[in-house]
Amino acid sequence: MKKYLIITLAFFALSACNRQQDLALKSADKDYILKVANENFEKKKWTNALALYERLSNLVAGTDDAANVVYNSAYANYYDKNYKLAGHQFKNFSVTFPQDARAEEAAYMSALCYYEGSMDYNLDQTSTDLAINEMQTFLNNYPDSERSKNIDKLIDELTYKLEFKAYENAKQYYKMADYKAASTAFENVLDDFPSTKLRTKIYDYMLKSKYELAVNSVYGLKKDRIETALSFTKQIEREVPGTDNAKTAADLQSKLVKEKETFAELEKKVEARNKEMKDKQQEAEAAMNLEKDKRSAEQGRRDSAALANPTPAATFKIKK
């Protein structure tokens, strides 16, 4: 019996709440609607509260209740995980009511909403960029806030997400054996994020990319690419001596030196071959020119002889 009594009471309570919500939605009484909306908010009935706060937006405009309606609406949307709308409302509150004691909290919550709306690293990161900008705006407006420490941590987290996306994109080029694109992409990651936590891994891929690009290069570009790769291995040894990166650099440097020596031998052979071909070509051209000169001289002699001994003029006998 006790169980059924509890269920019955809960049913009547729910019916009463639904009836109160319906009345508030149909009412034109600002105070009544606000009362029911705030009760829903306290009971964490975010959907019901938002429906009524939306009705109140025009009714409370210019009154003392306007700030509370915007503020509670923002929190209701935040708890209901409508982060984009909540962020807009919190920001609107901090801008519209800058003298309100809750303005700083609203600005902080706006930044937090943008943070919550940031997409996973493998998706478009426009939302992440917006979140970082919003958080930086908070730091600029409230540099001495106690919340700044947490904002700094969140910015670091979001920045790492951008770093990791750029790193993963560069790594894809390496996996596709597009070593030139990989090397450039990893360099861009370091340029864009000089304090990246991924520097060790990036160095490893850059060393391997430059090495593979050098040893697998076409003849005309091989020499320069070997020198570039060698230069980078030496740079790594100077920058991070004693590290795994430096060990990898030393190992690849040894291989590149051998590759350079092998290429130098090949270069000599190619140069000798080219010289031989050039000499043969020149000999052939000289022979052709000599033959041409001989023919020209012979033709000249014939022409001179013809001029010295002209062909007698034809004679005709006249019949008598």
Image (tube, helix red, strand yellow):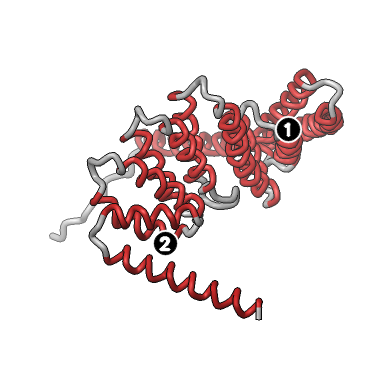
Q: Is residue 195 above or below residue 300?
A: above
Determine whether, in the image, residue 44 is placed left or right of residue 180.
left
Crowd class of label 1 (few under 14; some 14 to 19; many from 20; radius 10 Å):
many
From the top left corner, tell me how far across and down residue 201 is, in percent.
74, 36
Q: Secondary structure at mark 1?
A: helix
Identify the residue at the far front of this view.
1
Determine whether, in the image, residue 138 is placed left or right of residue 177.
left
Residue at the (43%, 70%) spot, across then down: 16
Q: Secondary structure at mark 2?
A: helix
Identify the residue at the far left of this view.
320
Viewport quadrant of the C terminus? bottom left
**Where, by quadrant of the figure, is residue 278 drawn?**
top right
From the top left corner, tell me how far across and down residue 281 is, in percent.
63, 37
Crowd class of label 2 (few under 14; some 14 to 19; many from 20; radius 10 Å):
many
Q: 301 or 260, which lies in front?
A: 260
- Point out the frontmost of discs 1 and 2: 2
Q: Which residue is mark 2?
A: 48
- Amino acid type, residue under disc 1 in the picture: Tyr
Q: 42 or 262, which lies in front?
A: 42
Q: Tell me the number on the disc at residue 146.
A: none
Can residue 298 be seen here? no
Can residue 168 be seen here? yes
From the top left corner, tell me how far across and down residue 260 is, in percent.
79, 30
Residue at the (27%, 66%) spot, across then down: 26
Q: Upstream in the sequence, badge 1 or badge 2?
A: 2
Residue at the (44%, 49%) spot, across then down: 84
From the top left corner, tell me how far across and down residue 208 is, in percent.
76, 38
- Amino acid type, residue under disc 2 in the picture: Asn
Q: Which residue is mark 1?
A: 203
